[in-house]
Image (tube, rainbow, N blue to C red):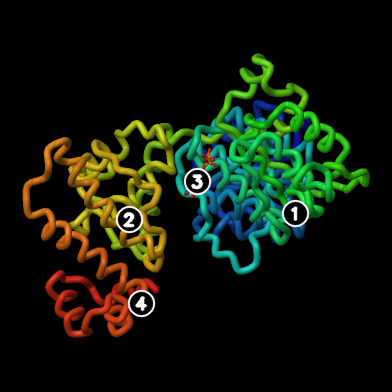
């Protein structure tokens, strides 16, 4: 898309950026004015009457995002391109929310900016995604500011407000479902359902009926009419996870539905309009699958309207420390002991190969939260857990889950056996395990009782004074559960 030449106003307090951007845009044929502050921008706005506004976020006398609505009121449809050094999902989304046309994280490529200006001139369209009511922007789910994630945020910001089909690609555990949910949650369909279906988890012969529903008697065992996921997702978003595992016949049916915008149930004749946004995801290489005859090429093109490629954790550099801390906080919020990371631990985490991506990191942090005896996790502890991974799928999710404590005991035992290999651990295991389990047991019970010692003592079946003594002996902060509640 090219939009010819136009009047571009560039606002940035950094003189070097103003000069470089002005020269690049002039070379591309545009007429450029620059401003170094919000006040200057306001002054120039009326006289220069820009066709595209390029603005930084942090300006000496205000926030570049806050001023966008005022500019759009004066010049409706004005495309605004936001440059930001903050690089979080929140900034990308806020920019979109304020009506920005595009968002470029700093440092940006000049060619990319020139293209964005040209697209903006051509489109003169603004998107208007809004945060759901009451949503705290700081609670947004996607963590990380590495360059590949900024690219992801940028694409999400571009698609939230429209209904384009999105194909999320990435290794297992990279956050594909999280991205799909973010697109739904921050778009206009957020008040309707988000329905996910995993093609790999459903028996092949049931996929069509799961997707499109079935009529009574459509096949043996179909005793009543059942609504499929398409129907359940009406008005909302349908997330087709592991699309590469979809059987061929179901692919054909899905393609027809996407082409016609309507579907019929298995065994039914009536057409039902499909008012759903489709987001598909896979960790498989679809072009290769197509070449091998396992995936329909025409369906691929239907789904691959806007691809979003998620980086592996190995490519996310500094995000690893930020994610690790986020997962430790989440573990603490779930009632597990609150732990911190020392710099050596973060460095060790960053060196790891992470075949299991973010999910593997999350599991490791939960395991460390339960198993580490110290409040601050060191590189040695990280190393130990990476060297002797124990099964972590079942670590306690909440302090109140009855399986949680048993799992914690199992983790402790597993650690002993992992440490000592085939040799039995030195004797005294009974006391040692009990001593280790006592702390998480008391902490989890206190968390479950929301810091109320009487209730925690009752839960444990011990005397309140005994509990108090144990809390003192083990130096457990009795107020922590109350405060984190
Ligand atoms: N950027 C991120 N910020 C915070 N949490 C994340 C991020 N990416 C992934 N996660 C967390 O990692 C876990 C795995 O994410 P998710 O299930 O979305 O991955 P996936 O790619 O869909 O996995 P699979 O391919 O196995 O289905 C989830 O608990 C999710 O909350």
Nearer the camera: disc 4 or disc 2:
2
The Cα–Cα distance between marks 1 and 2, rounded to whole angstroms, is: 36 Å
The Cα–Cα distance between marks 3 and 2, rounded to whole angstroms, is: 39 Å
Which sits earlier in the primary sequence, circle 3 or circle 1? Answer: 3
- For the C terminus, the quadrant is bottom left
Q: Position of residue 221 (x, y in %)?
A: 75, 47
Q: Quadrant of residue 396?
A: bottom left
Residue 87 badge: 3
Q: Can residue 106 be seen in this snapshot?
A: no
- Residue lying farthest to the front in this orientation: 220
Q: Quadrant of residue 446?
A: bottom left
Residue 363 badge: none
Residue, disc 2:
407
Residue 449 badge: 4
Q: Residue at x 59, y 57 (%)?
A: 38
Q: Position of residue 186 (x, y in %)?
A: 65, 55
Q: Position of residue 296 (x, y in %)?
A: 73, 23
Judged left or right of residue 281, residue 484 is left
Q: Is mark 3 within 8 Å of ligand 1?
A: no
Residue, disc 1:
232
**Which of the pair 129/240 is nearer the observer?**
240
Nearer the camera: disc 3 or disc 1:
1
Judged left or right of residue 368, residue 268 is right
**Mark 3: which secondary structure?**
loop
Which sits earlier in the primary sequence, circle 1 or circle 2? Answer: 1
The Cα–Cα distance between marks 3 and 1, rounded to whole angstroms, is: 36 Å
Q: Residue at x 14, y 40 (%)?
A: 420
Which sits earlier in the primary sequence, circle 3 or circle 2? Answer: 3
**Mark 4: which secondary structure?**
loop
As displayed, is residue 232 above or below residue 300?
Answer: below
């Amino acid at each position: 898309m090219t939009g010819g030449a136009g009047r571009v106003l560039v606002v940035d307090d950094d003189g070097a950026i103003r000069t470089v951007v002005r020269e690049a845009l002039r070379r591309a044929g545009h007429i450029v004015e620059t401003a170094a502050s919000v006040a200057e921008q306001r002054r120039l706005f009326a006289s220069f009457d820009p066709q595209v506004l390029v603005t930084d976020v942090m300006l000496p006398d205000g926030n570049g995002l806050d001023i966008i609505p005022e500019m759009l009121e004066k010049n409706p449809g004005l495309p605004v391109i936001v440059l930001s050094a903050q690089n979080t999902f929140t900034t990308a989304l806020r920019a979109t929310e304020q009506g920005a046309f595009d968002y470029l994280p700093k440092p940006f490529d000049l060619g990319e900016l020139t293209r964005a200006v040209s697209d903006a001139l051509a489109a003169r369209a603004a998107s208007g995604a809004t945060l759901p009511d009451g949503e705290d922007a700081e609670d947004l789910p996607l963590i990380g500011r590495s360059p590949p994630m900024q690219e992801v945020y940028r694409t999400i910001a571009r698609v939230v407000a429209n209904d384009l089909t999105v194909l999320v690609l990435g290794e297992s555990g990279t956050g594909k479902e999280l991205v799909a949910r973010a697109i739904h949650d921050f778009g206009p369909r957020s008040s309707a359902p988000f329905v996910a279906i995993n093609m790999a988890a459903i028996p092949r012969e049931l996929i069509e009926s799961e997707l499109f529903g079935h009529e009574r008697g459509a096949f043996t065992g179909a005793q009543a009419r059942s609504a499929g996921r398409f129907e359940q997702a009406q008005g909302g978003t349908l997330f087709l996870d592991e699309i590469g595992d979809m059987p061929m016949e179901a692919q054909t049916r899905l393609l027809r539905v996407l082409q016609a915008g309507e579907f019929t149930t298995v065994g039914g004749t009536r057409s039902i309009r499909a008012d759903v946004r489709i987001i598909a995801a896979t960790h498989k290489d679809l072009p290769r699958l197509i070449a091998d005859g396992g995936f329909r090429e025409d369906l691929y093109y239907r789904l691959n309207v806007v691809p979003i490629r998620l980086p592996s954790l190995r490519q996310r550099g500094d995000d690893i420390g930020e994610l690790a801390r986020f997962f430790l906080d989440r573990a603490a919020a779930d009632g597990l002991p609150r732990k911190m990371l020392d710099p050596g631990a973060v460095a060790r985490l960053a060196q790891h190969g992470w075949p299991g991506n973010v999910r593997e990191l999350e599991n490791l942090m939960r395991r460390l939260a339960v198993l580490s005896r110290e409040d601050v996790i060191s590189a040695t502890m990280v190393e130990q857990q990476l060297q002797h991974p124990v099964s972590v799928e079942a670590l306690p999710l909440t302090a109140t889950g009855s399986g949680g404590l048993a799992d914690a005991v199992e983790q402790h035992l597993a650690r002993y056996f992992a440490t000592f290999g085939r040799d039995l651990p030195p004797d005294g295991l009974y006391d040692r395990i009990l001593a280790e389990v006592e702390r998480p047991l008391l902490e989890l019970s206190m968390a479950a009782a929301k810091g109320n010692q009487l209730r925690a003592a009752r839960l444990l079946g011990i005397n309140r004074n005994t509990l108090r003594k144990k809390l003192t002996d083990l130096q457990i902060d009795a107020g922590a559960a109350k405060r984190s509640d």
